[in-house]
Structures are given as structure tokens and as C-alpha cells.
Amino acid sequence: GAVVSQHPSWVICKSGTSVKIECRSLDFQATTMFWYRQFPKQSLMLMATSNEGSKATYEQGVEKDKFLINHASLTLSTLTVTSAHPEDSSFYICSARPTGIDTEAFFGQGTRLTVV
Amino acid sequence: GQNIDQPTEMTATEGAIVQINCTYQTSGFNGLFWYQQHAGEAPTFLSYNVLDGLEEKGRFSSFLSRSKGYSYLLLKELQMKDSASYLCAVVDSNYQLIWGAGTKLIIKP
């Protein structure tokens, strides 16, 4: 099946610094990628929809200036958590959908972010 | 508003069959996904339904009724490794995934 690679798998950073998470579709092109956040004991929450070549669409309550999303190519989207704080510690997951609506969405392995 | 409902938790016995239901009210419908998620891991794709009916994949089957806004995931010959959360997600008219809160399935020997 199609592979989505997310990097890094885990990261620890100091409060106030920025962290970049990459999401790559390895063997298919993805016009649309999705970024999710999961807090403990909660379901995945969609943060934003990333469309190649255009601005991301953010869900209500998600700060676009804090969570910068760039989708510069059909195989790469990045999420940058700017000025991270301990409350941003979470599990961030991306998914990518190959072109065509009747296709599966494939998920990356997730990134566990810990801000200290 | 948009809403996906699934039971919070279910318990079943190893070797048995369990059915996890999902009902939805969304703005448009472009398909429904079922995902399995083990604690601390990313979700794993199980099935995708866009037409009414039953889709069978080995021990797992998924059913959809668009007119009723209803789907279920059927797991047969349950194994201990099937203990996980099962997430129902609907693709709405904007092609975004609307997620249910997930059903925690506990398998007992």
C-alpha cells in the first residue's frame, strides 16, 4: 500500500522554540494532506487541511500563526509549531490522500512532541 | 452541526463476533472510513465505504446505509490483538474527515 512518512517520530524541545514536522507521501502524489492532533484519551482532532500550492484551511480554534503549514509540493507538507509551550505537547499525525475521492487516506506514523 | 456517534467502549470474548456501530449527521457525504488505533500509535486503515452494502475483508467487514446515516464494523473470530480503539470517520462535502470519538474494544480470554 501507499506509504506516508512522518519525521521526526518524537521530539523534545524547550519552551519558546519552534519545531518542524514533515509529512511525505513516498510513492504517490497527494494534493491534499491533513494534520491532526491527539491528546491523551481523546480522539484525533483535525487541525488543518493542507492543499498543495495554496494556503491551508484551519479548523476553528486552531491558531494559524502558531501552527504554520506549508504544502509546497505534491509529496511534502510541513507543520511548524512556533514558540512551542508545554500545552502544545501532543501526538501530531498527518494523513495524505492520493488524487481521486474514492481512495483511502494514508497516515503517517505520528510525531510525539514534548515541550519542556 | 456535524456529528458522529459511536459507543465509547465495548467488551467481547476471544473467538467471538462483535459489531461496532456508527451513526452520522454531516453536511454532505463522500465516504466513510473505519480505522483501528492501538494506544500510542497512529490509526491504521481498515475499510472505506461509499456505496450502500457490505464490504468484506477477511475477518473484518464494514456495512453502510447512506439513507440511514449508519455504518457498522463487524469483527469475526476475535483475537486478543484486536483490542484497540476503532474510529469511524466521514468525508463531508468539503472532503474533510469528520471523526467519531472512537470505540474502545476490550477483548477478554
Image (cartoon, grey):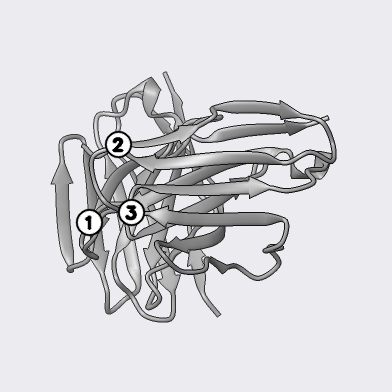
Image quarter of the N terminus of chain B: bottom right
Q: Is residue B67 above or below residue A5?
A: below
**Residue, far top:** B109
Residue positioned 67% across, 63% down in the render: A64
Residue positioned 18% across, 68% down in the render: B52
> Which residue bears the numbered disc 3?
A74
Question: Badge 1: few (under 14), some or many (20 or more) residues near its Cα, within 10 Å?
Answer: few
Tell me: B108 left or right of B59. Answer: right
Residue positioned 48% across, 59% down in the render: B99
Question: Badge 3: few (under 14), some or many (20 or more) residues near its Cα, within 10 Å?
Answer: many
Residue B105 position within the rendered picture, expressed as x and y whole percent measured from the top left: 46, 37
Residue A43 position within the rendered picture, expressed as x and y whole percent measured from the top left: 57, 49
Query: From the viewer's perspective, is the residue at label 2 or at label 3 nearer?
Result: 3
> Which residue bears the numbered disc 2?
A3
Question: Marks 2/3: CA distance?
Answer: 14 Å
Query: Which label's residue is closer to the chain start, 2 or 3?
Result: 2
Q: Amino acid at mark 2?
A: Val
Query: From the viewer's perspective, is the residue at label 3 or at label 1 nearer?
Result: 3
> Which residue bears the numbered disc 1?
A103
| Quadrant of the rendered image containing residue A14 | top right
Question: Badge 2: few (under 14), some or many (20 or more) residues near its Cα, within 10 Å?
Answer: some
Query: Which label's residue is closer to the chain start, 2 or 1?
Result: 2
Tell me: A66 left or right of B23. Answer: right
Question: Marks 2/1: CA distance?
Answer: 14 Å
Residue positioned 80% across, 44% down in the render: A87
Give the chain of mark 1: A
What secondary structure is found at the residue carrying circle 1? loop
Q: Amino acid at mark 3?
A: Leu
